[in-house]
Image (tube, helix red, strand yellow):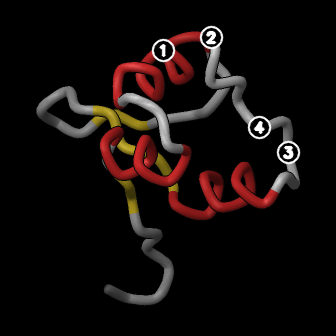
Amino acid sequence: MDGTSERLLTPGEVATLFRVDPKTVTRWAASGRISSIRTPGGHRRFREAEVRELLEGNDATPDPSI
């Protein structure tokens, strides 16, 4: 990596951090509560820095009940 690349997390990794089901993370992304990018194969990936900010409460943390 050249230092400008950011680590991308899978829905499963994000789910583990938030202690929710991976499908919940997918719903958050579909509703715009968390941004995601798509791989060439169509899989969702999440920017680690954004996920960490959400975990630290620097932004509106997704509601696990949604």
Q: Which residue is mark 4?
A: 61
User: For the N terminus, which image quadrant?
Assistant: bottom left
Q: Are marks 4 and 2 in contact (CB under 8 Å)?
A: no
How packed mark 3 is, by other alpha carbons closer than 10 Å (few <14, some 14-19, many 20 or more), is few
Q: Are marks 3 and 1 in contact (CB under 8 Å)?
A: no
Q: Which mark is residue 17?
A: none
Look at the picture and state if 1 lies above or below 53.
Answer: below
View extreme (bottom): residue: 2
Find the distance from the CA under tag 3 to the CA under tag 1.
Answer: 18 Å
- Helix or strand or loop: what does disc 4 sit on? loop
Residue at the (35%, 52%) spot, across then down = 13
**Which amino acid type is shown beneath numbered disc 4?**
Thr
Q: Which mark is residue 27?
A: 1
- How many numbered tags mark residues here? 4
Counting from the top left corner in percent of width and height, residue 52 is at: 65, 61
View extreme (left): residue: 41
Q: Nearer the viewer, mark 2 or mark 1?
A: 2
Q: First in sequence, mark 3 or 2: give its number.
A: 3
Look at the picture and state if 3 lies above or below 34.
Answer: below
Q: Are marks 2 and 1 in contact (CB under 8 Å)?
A: yes
Counting from the top left corner in percent of width and height, residue 20 is at: 47, 33
Q: Are marks 3 and 4 in contact (CB under 8 Å)?
A: yes
Q: Horizontally, is 47 left or right of 44 in the view? A: right
How packed mark 2 is, by other alpha carbons closer than 10 Å (few <14, some 14-19, many 20 or more), is few
**Which amino acid type is shown beneath numbered disc 2?**
Ile
**Which amino acid type is shown beneath numbered disc 1?**
Arg
- Helix or strand or loop: what does disc 2 sit on? loop
Q: Which residue is mark 2?
A: 66
Q: Horizontally, is 45 left or right of 48 in the view? A: left
Q: First in sequence, mark 2 or 1: give its number.
A: 1
Q: Which residue is mark 3?
A: 59
Residue at the (43%, 73%) spot, across then down = 5
